[in-house]
Image (cartoon, grey):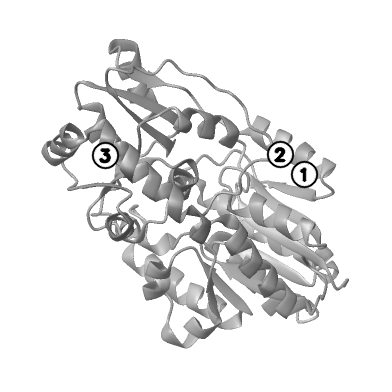
Amino acid sequence: MTQNKILLAQNSAFIANRLPRAARALKEAGYDVDILNWNRGENAEIIQNATESFRLEGITVHSIYCGNTPYGKGIITVFNKILFIIKVILFLFKNGHQYKVVHAIDFDLALPVYIAKVLNPKLKFEVIYDIADFVETFHSPIPKFIRSMIKNLSERIMKHANVVIIPDENRLLNIPIEFQNKTVIINNSIDPPQQTVDYEVKVNDDKLNIFYYGALSKDRGIELLLKQKNVSLWFAGKGELQGEIVEYADTYDNIHYLGYLQLEQILSVASQMDVIYMVYDPSYQHNQIASPNKLYEALYLGKSCIVAENTSIDLFVEKYDIGYITRFDEYNLNKVIKSISKEELILKGNNAKSIYPAFSWDTSKRKLIEIYKSITKKGDTI
């Protein structure tokens, strides 16, 4: 084991920014960083590009493939998921002695990391359990007894972990009180890319331009947004509603689908928009403690946003006057959209820009590196 060699592990590590930004920050701080990624047989180009990019930065990516494992298929892919757990355990049996810290993001990586240490006491690495999402709260056909089992196992992993990380203080309610003293908040703020790109779109200056990007799933208020008139709607991302959005874009001149975009492209498009849309359905338990990357990206760009009541981020938006709050229904969303003025957008956007430094990645990065310093006893980090 080397004092500063660490492993960050996540399912589909390159789809979201949580792992990549942490890996780069820790590499910059002097750590020898490896990444363990689940290659689910999708997004091959993204994985290939990320692997090569990280290689050039001195970070090694290990990808585990267990056959094509599409998202959202539930029990159909259960064999692949079990196989993935086994392969992670075997990877750690073979390589785990190299690492001082294994940083597991979410339950599907934390579970095999925990099992590996239980089965092989010779593995001495420390464990960071980074809970971006509580899977037991997701809206899915998972039976209640399995959700309860996941919750109990997750709490056992928390007990075993040296540090627990969550992205938002609202999620402390899912952390048992006895583990809150070792829980640290590392938010989902953007790590601004070193290079910017110009991805110009033809916005309609006579209409309000609203942008939604990310997972195109049914709990994101997309179907409510598609019904809005006299606005220009822009979508980017992948997911179950992708086909429906493409059909709308082919039918209506005010609806545009940009496909899947990289972060640099997303930021370029978002900078040209009036409002960032993040109206999550509060009837889904996990949306009641939402902590979307989009919120911090809106702060970074100085853009106002629209959010739904009872999703926790509505309290943040109201506190800092950085956007608009709607009930999760078509009528109230329409009412809010009609109330928006260009002058007010500028004011709320300026409010967003002014508070960004307090929630920036630089602030969270320092906290993350302090966590690693305390575990590895590494001195010169920044």
**Residue 53 image-quadrant placement:** top right
- Residue at screen point 16% across, 32% down: 338
In front: label 3 or label 2: 3
The residue wearing badge 1 is 54
Any mark on residue 344, and which? 3
Q: Residues within 10 Å of mark 1 (few under 14, many from 20)?
A: some
- Residue at screen point 71% across, 57% down: 25
Residue at the bottom extreme? 178
| Mark toward the start of the polypeptide (3 vs 2) | 2
Residue 240 visible in rendering? no
Asked if the residue under mark 1 is in contact with the one under mark 2, i.e. CB atoms within 8 Å, the reply is yes
Q: What kind of residue is marked 3?
A: Glu
The residue wearing badge 2 is 50
Residue 279 position, x and y percent, is 29, 44
Q: Is residue 104 above or below residue 287?
A: below
Spatial CA span between label 2 and label 1:
6 Å
**Residue 177 image-quadrant placement:** bottom left
Residue 10 position, x and y percent, is 62, 55
In front: label 1 or label 3: 3
Residue 198 position, x and y percent, is 58, 23
